[in-house]
Image (cartoon, grey):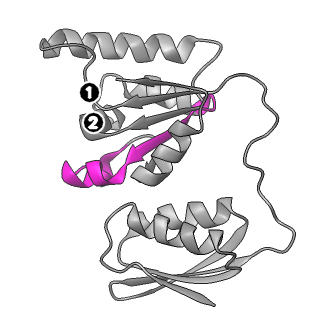
């Protein structure tokens, strides 16, 4: 069994360390982390790569024990149906210096996006953009509509920790820079706001 000690490592290092061992051919892993965001991120990676995962906790240590499920390969992507669009949102407003106008424009943009027949495959929220997934955001309901319609919503865990809002997000999955970059660079087209 391969052991990955990611204790004290900041996001996205636990995911990167685990992925490196998977790429070397590890079929059984024990990953040590010290926070729940890392547990969530590493678990998603492992399950996405065809591993079964068990979690045990001991004080500040969380141990993920993972074993490759025989014959279980998760396809990288299904046959290409349409071009995939990714959107990276790094601000809670759209545009320049007028915050009031920027908030109105962002809400209108997300509202229109939620009504389109072809929606983005993934939206990632970083920096001040994470404030849009809070329940008191005027755009949160549109983001919920997008998620319900199949858009994967990723929210930067480092950013929610910085703003002290991790337990307040109302939509999406707390994620990490590595997963966000993998999803965005895997898309055919990317918009950045």
Alpha carbon separation for disc pair 2 and 1: 6 Å
Q: Which residue is mark 1?
A: 92
| Residue numbers of the magenta segment | 148-169
**Identity of the residue drawn at 73% across and 65% down:** 50
Count neighbours of disc 2 (C-alpha within 10 A) and say few if under 14, some if 14 to 19, many if 20 or more.
Answer: many
| Pick the front one: 17 or 166 | 17
Residue at disc 2, secondary structure: helix
Tell me: 90 left or right of 16.
left
Count every numbered label the image shows and give the total. Answer: 2
Q: Give residue 100's quadrant in the image.
A: top left
Q: Which residue is mark 2?
A: 131
| Pick the front one: 127 or 16 | 16
**Identity of the residue drawn at 29% across and 54% down:** 158
Q: Is residue 155 magenta?
A: yes
Vertical side of 141 occupied by 108: above or below: above
Task: Name the quarter where the N terminus is drawn.
Answer: bottom right
| Pick the front one: 134 or 9 | 9
Residue at disc 1, secondary structure: loop
Vertical side of 118 occupied by 7: above or below: below
Count neighbours of disc 1 (C-alpha within 10 A) and say few if under 14, some if 14 to 19, many if 20 or more.
Answer: many
Q: Give residue 38's quadrant in the image.
A: bottom left
Tell me: 74 left or right of 71.
left
Q: Position of residue 57 (x, y in %)?
A: 45, 85
Answer with mark 2 or mark 1, whichever residue precedes in sequence.
Answer: 1
Q: Position of residue 31 (x, y in %)?
A: 51, 80
**Identity of the residue drawn at 78% across and 30% down:** 80
Q: Position of residue 114 (x, y in %)?
A: 52, 18
Tell me: 163 left or right of 177.
left
Task: Name the quarter where the C terminus is drawn.
Answer: top left
Q: Position of residue 27 (x, y in %)?
A: 71, 80
Vertical side of 15 occupied by 166: above or below: above
Contact, CB < 8 Å: mark 2 with mark 1? Answer: yes
């Amino acid at each position: 069994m391969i052991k990955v000690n990611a204790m004290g490592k900041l996001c996205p290092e636990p995911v990167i360390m685990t992925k490196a061992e998977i790429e070397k051919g590890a079929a059984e892993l024990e990953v040590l982390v010290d926070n729940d965001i890392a547990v969530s991120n590493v678990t998603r990676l492992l399950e996405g790569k065809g591993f079964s995962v068990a979690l045990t906790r001991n004080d500040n240590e969380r141990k993920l024990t993972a074993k490759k499920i025989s014959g279980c390969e998760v396809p990288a992507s299904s046959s290409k149906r349409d071009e995939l669009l990714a959107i990276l949102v790094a601000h809670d407003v759209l545009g320049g210096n007028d915050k009031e106008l920027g908030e109105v424009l962002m809400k209108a943009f997300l509202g229109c996006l939620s009504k389109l027949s072809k929606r983005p495959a993934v939206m990632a929220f970083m920096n001040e953009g994470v404030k849009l997934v809070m329940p008191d955001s005027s755009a949160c309901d549109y983001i919920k509509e997008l998620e319900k319609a199949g858009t994967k919503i990723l929210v930067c865990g480092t950013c929610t920790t910085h703003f002290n809002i991790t337990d307040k997000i109302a939509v999406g999955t707390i994620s990490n820079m590595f997963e966000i970059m993998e999803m965005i660079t895997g898309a055919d087209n990317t918009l950045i706001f």
